[in-house]
Amino acid sequence: MSKTVTAENFHISIDDQEHPYCQPVELPFTLPTRLYAGMLVVWLLRPALQKRFPLHQFKPSTYLEFLAWCTYIGRRQYALLREIEAWNLELMQPLEMPLNKDCPWGRSYTVAMYLSGIARSKYWNGQLLASTKMRHRVARWYFRDGRELLGLKRCPPWQQAALENNFISVDAFTKTLILPKDVNAPEGEYRIHQNVEDIQQAWGGVSDKTSDTRPTNILPVNSSHVSQYIAAFLPVEVNEVSWLMSELRKRLPSRKPNHSEVIQVMALLPKTTRKPCTKLEKPFGVNLIGYARGELGIGEDVRMLAASLESADVPFNVINVEPGANVSQKDTSAEHWMAESFDYAINIFCMTGIEMSRMSMEKGLGWLNGHYNIGLWPWELPAWPAAWHHAWHLVDELWGISHYTANAYSAAPVPVKPMPLPVEINTSEVIADRQKWKLPTEDYLFVFSFDMNSTLTRKNPIAIVEAFLYAFASQPEKRVGLVIKVSHLNKKHPTWKPLEKLLNQDPRLYLVSGELRKPDVLSLYKSCDCFVSLHRAEGFGRGLAEAQLLGLDLIATGYSGNMEFCANNATHTVDYQLVSLKAGEYFYGEGQQWAEPNIQHAAKLMQACATKVRNPEHDYPVARFGPRYCGEVYRERLQEIARFLN
């Protein structure tokens, strides 16, 4: 049976509380609870949050609203936020709301209830503070479902005492929570009783109702402090309707912060570092974590690493994670390696550092516990972005899929090792079939493949079409063609329109679209003569490596990770100039450079390839792609780690 990693597989440890993501952030103003580093990481992961909560403006009201979101929404979506024990204690402290004789909840409000109430009030703090009805709705939601949803099931003694003081009996308290829909639903009332069973059982039996365990070494959140804090946000005259309307008029559409503004916010993160792994606590071997079923390049990385470890007799299993609904997950070749438990001492995470951060937020830090953690993180630009330096604290070591990628992590506070990336094709099973693809049988065909889930500015397919047209548009009789294979075609995407316009300029340009299985993609490559990649940057370039294994001619930009295996006479490398990335061209690319390939030079290389006699034998360095070769390199490093930590 196939297994997929879930949050239930992980358990938090005391040591995780010292992780930088669990540490508080220093702010120049006071909030009802402290803000924690993990919250800023969540903000960084979600552009919509950056726009909704412009933290770069450093307004206390914005930080209050974001803290409310983290409490009401964030805790439900991200396990790590529920695992910060200091924050859990702060959220359960008493909060004295402004007095209101009609409010049945008296002094039973916790900080968590207050912050959740702000979010439920559409972030209009005054509505919660002034409206008895809203206060009641928030409290009712909290005791009906909220405690469970927020991971704050415990009712502290002081709150138990406040409830008993506010309600004449436990039945009166419970009756306040029941809605008409509960009466009409099967077991509706029973569910509510179950959700407050701890309060019902403790009713009248608390020996010291005024005391409670307070967190140590943190900012105390006491009633007087919070009352003063709330007073700062109250209008001078509480007129709910007029005040809310004035607040609404003040709310203008926010913009997403730019790169430098994001870096300013992330500079708030604490400077502490994660404690490194000092001893292996489980048997020698590897847990490979990644998109094992995903039909995408990074999924192929997992499967090929598994084959390499197997060839080197390194014990391992594969932990599958889901890449998202827009990625096909039909590859079953790794099923026999899949497991659910993290059985071995070393974890290798085959995903980007950004994705590893996202999953650590969603699932918590438990999957790091008791392991030496290696990040095999693909990255295409020459430097890892400053806004994501904190992700280095998730790993004990980084493996670069090329020397180029390893150099991008040169500032990391952990060991960085360039490692070969395995690529394997059973060439005897790859059949060229131009008739299947409706391609001309005698023409010299160039081919390029890309996925619109990737970034077209980096893959640069437009340059390939332009180079083809520059080379052959004046020779309509020339028996040549260019095949463009695109996955996840989105004709509404603005980057597609210019490419589509070019593809209509010459009948020798062929478009193949759709999500093909790997054997079909290789068959398409094999049906052509030359693979062309005018990329601006590649971390490795799996498609280029596959073209070499298939014996195709290869034209490629002479820059970035592909030069690990393209710096040879057999590959036709294209001249380029380094240019600065423009805003929005690539994730966190501001301030960095990549290649702008010379289209005229690429066109000349295309003309040369189409003219010369086809040579099926190329002197490509394909031995370095072999799983056995890669497996031996991996085993040597893994054994070195084991010797050092045992």
Image: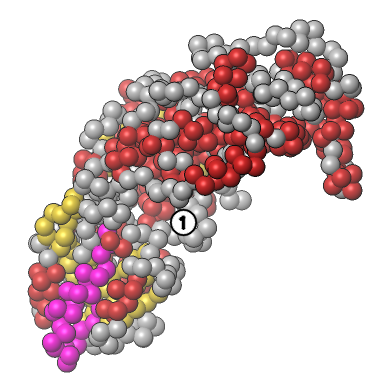
Residue 466 falls in image quadrant: bottom left
* Residue behind mark 1: 294
Q: Type of residue at label 1?
A: Gly
Relative to 163, residue 76 above or below:
below
Q: Which residue occupies the extreme front position in the image?
A: 237
In the displayed structure image, the side of residue 531 where residue 115 appears, left or right: right
The colour scheme applied to this rendered structure is secondary structure
In the displayed structure image, the side of residue 328 where residue 134 appears, left or right: right
Give the quarter of the figure containing the C terminus.
top left
- Front residue of 34/623: it is 34
The residues colored magenta run 458-482
| Magenta run includes residue 467 | yes
Q: Secondary structure at mark 1?
A: loop
Figure label count: 1
- Front residue of 446/143: it is 143
Residue 426, percent from left and from top: 35, 64
Q: Is residue 315 visible?
A: no
Relative to 199, residue 419 above or below:
below
Residue 478, percent from left and from top: 16, 88
| Magenta run includes residue 294 | no
- Front residue of 11/580: it is 580
Residue at 13%, 79% (x, y): give it.
471
Residue at 26%, 78% (x, y): give it.
502
